[in-house]
Image: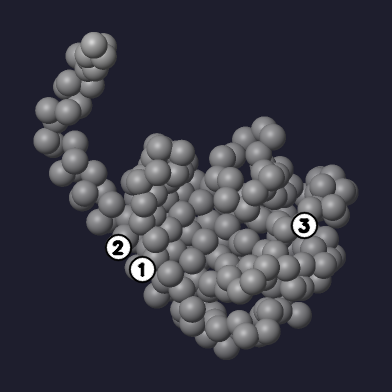
């Protein structure tokens, strides 16, 4: 006979907690409203900009995604602008990861990658010192931060960043905002998303 599956007291308490899931639904609705606000803000930022973009790039393309299992945690994100065609990627992703942080990330792969890398290094001091990091994970879809995962783009790290960047087949530059950051409780996330987009523009412009 199979062994019975037993639930711990903590698990039973969570299973019986109706308030948690109502609160979760409310939080996720507020996150979506935040991403909606950021989408509107970024549309105004993009208007009239000349970007170094792959062929067939559509500056109006975007997507909202909501899921439950980013390493077992719920998440939502906005990709805008969004370009995923074959091996070419150019997107600005604004991600909420439950239990972790908000992340605003410029994701680049494929056509134009060498030009983007060159722009970052040639304009390094325009980008550095703005709370951005170069993401070091083996995949574009790694969202952890800290030692081994991110390299801060500080003014004194130009040569280190150039060395790390040189052999990478893609790159991602991101700003992370912890959920305990006052910016979250004070409703400043849309503004930080806009600031981050402006901070990475030297990588994307001719």
Label pair 3/1, CB-CB below 8 angstroms: no
SS under mark 3 = loop
Could you say where residue 141 lies in the image, as x and y percent from the top left? 57, 51
Q: Nearer the viewer, mark 3 or mark 2?
A: 3
Q: How far from the left and from the top, in percent, is residue 24?
A: 23, 44
Asked if the residue under mark 2 is in contact with the one under mark 1, i.e. CB atoms within 8 Å, the reply is yes
Mark 2 is surrounded, within 10 Å at the Cα level, by few (under 14), some (14 to 19) or many (20 or more) other residues, namely few
Q: Identify the element where label 2 is drawn.
A: helix
- The residue that disc 1 covers is 37
* Residue indicated by mark 2: 33
Q: Is residue 158 visible?
A: no
Residue 114 as seen in the image, left or right of residue 61: right
Residue 86 lies in quadrant: bottom right
Residue sitting at x 71%, y 57%: 171
In the rendered view of the protein, which quadrant contains the C terminus? bottom right
Residue nearer the viewer, 40 or 187? 40
Measure how far apart labels 3 and 1 are at the Cα level: 33 Å
Residue 62 visible here: yes
For label 3, count other residues whose C-alpha is less than 10 Å away and answer few (under 14), some (14-19) or many (20+): few
Identify the secondary structure beneath mark 1: helix
Q: Quadrant of residue 1?
A: top left
Q: In the image, is 65 to the left or to the right of 22?
A: right
Indicate the position of residue 65 as horizontal and vertical percent values: 39, 61
3 or 1: tag closer to the N-terminus: 1
Q: Which residue is mark 3?
A: 169
Distance CA(mark 3)–CA(mark 2)? 34 Å
């Amino acid at each position: 006979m199979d062994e019975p599956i037993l639930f711990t007291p903590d698990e039973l308490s969570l299973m019986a907690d109706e308030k948690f899931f109502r609160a979760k639904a409310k939080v996720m609705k507020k996150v979506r409203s935040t991403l909606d606000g950021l989408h509107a803000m970024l549309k105004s930022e993009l208007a009239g900009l000349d970007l170094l973009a792959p062929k067939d790039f559509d500056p109006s393309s975007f997507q909202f995604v909501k899921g439950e299992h980013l390493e077992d945690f719920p998440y939502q994100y906005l990709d805008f602008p969004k370009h995923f065609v074959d091996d070419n990627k150019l997107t600005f992703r604004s991600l909420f990861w439950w239990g972790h942080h908000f992340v605003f990330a410029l994701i680049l792969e494929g056509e134009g990658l060498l030009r983007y890398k060159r722009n970052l290094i040639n304009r390094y001091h325009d980008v550095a010192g703005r709370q951005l990091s170069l993401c070091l994970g083996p995949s574009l879809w790694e969202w952890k931060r800290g030692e081994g995962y991110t390299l801060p783009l500080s003014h004194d790290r130009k040569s280190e960043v150039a060395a790390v960047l040189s052999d990478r087949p893609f790159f991602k530059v991101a700003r992370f905002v912890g959920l305990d950051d006052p910016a979250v409780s004070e409703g400043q996330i849309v503004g930080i998303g806009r600031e981050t987009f402006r901070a990475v523009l030297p990588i994307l412009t001719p």
